[in-house]
């Protein structure tokens, strides 16, 4: 990693918003056939499951490398759980340890807030994400709310010290 600097920002910070948009541009096409051309009721169900209420977002981090924003992760309070959300590293910056650094920062935030476990949801068309989570000690768990409407969800948890 070259000069990584992880900064806490607001959920609606323009840089964070752009990194999440970059994630959508990268990952969205992988699932397009599962989300497009759905009947209206199913589309509403999926939109509701994947919606994020900014009030539930408790911390948003952007990783800068050489003063350029290259990665993003957020922490959401989901009921009694802490959830890792919207982890993304720009494609040209992958393989440099940035996602791992952000996950460690989010996990530290959970512990600082008194939490002892973190959960996350990803999809079956993101094998690189699954490989990273498993490498970092996350274990598969059953699909949890609100993602139960998306059977292709892969959910993980990690107990924290």
Image (tube, rainbow, N blue to C red):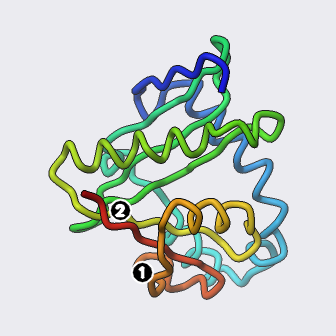
Q: Nearer the viewer, mark 1 or mark 2?
A: 2
Q: Residue 82's spot in the image, x, y percent?
A: 31, 59
Q: Quadrant of the C terminus?
A: bottom left
Label 1 SS? loop
x and y, in percent, of residue 57 in the image: 36, 46
**Which residue is painted at 60% across and 68% down in the image?**
122
List the residue tagged with mark 2.
Answer: 118
Q: Is residue 16 left or right of residue 34?
A: left
Q: Are marks 1 and 2 in contact (CB under 8 Å)?
A: no
Q: Quadrant of residue 125?
A: bottom right
Distance of mark 1 from mark 2, alpha carbons?
A: 13 Å
What's the residue at 79%, 72% (across, down)? 36
- Which x, y percent locates residue 159? 32, 67
Q: Secondary structure at mark 2?
A: strand
Quarter occupied by residue 117: bottom left
Q: Position of residue 93 (x, y in %)?
A: 76, 34
The residue indicated by pointer 1 is 144
Q: Residue furthest left?
A: 114
Is 156 located above or below residue 107 in the figure? below
Q: In the picture, residue 3 is in which quadrant?
A: top right
Q: Badge 2 local density, few (<14 within 10 Å), some, or many (20+)?
A: many
- Decide if residue 102 is on the left or right side of residue 99: left
Quarter of the picture containing the N terminus is top right
Is residue 49 placed above or below 116 in the rendered structure? below
Q: Earlier in the sequence, mark 1 or mark 2?
A: 2
Instruction: Tally the marks.
Output: 2
Q: Residue at x 35, y 62 (%)?
A: 118
The numbered disc on residue 108 is none
Q: Relative to residue 141, is residue 14 drawn left or right?
A: right
Q: Residue at x 74, y 73 (%)?
A: 35
**In this view of the protein, which residue sits in the foreground, 66 or 32?**
66
């Amino acid at each position: 990693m070259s000069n990584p600097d992880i900064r806490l920002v607001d959920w609606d910070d323009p840089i964070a918003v752009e990194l999440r948009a970059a994630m959508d541009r990268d990952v969205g096409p992988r699932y397009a056939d599962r989300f497009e051309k759905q009947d209206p009721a199913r589309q509403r169900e999926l939109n509701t499951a994947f919606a994020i209420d900014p009030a539930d977002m408790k911390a948003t981090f952007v990783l800068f490398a050489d003063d350029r924003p290259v990665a993003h992760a957020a922490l959401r309070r989901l009921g009694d759980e802490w959830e890792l959300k919207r982890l993304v590293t720009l494609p040209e910056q992958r393989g440099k340890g940035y996602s791992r650094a952000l996950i460690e920062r989010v996990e530290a935030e959970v512990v600082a807030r008194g939490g002892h476990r973190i959960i996350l949801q990803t999809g079956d068309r993101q094998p690189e994400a699954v490989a990273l989570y498993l490498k970092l000690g996350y274990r598969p768990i059953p699909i949890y709310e609100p993602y139960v409407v998306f059977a292709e969800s892969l959910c993980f948890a990690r107990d924290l010290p």
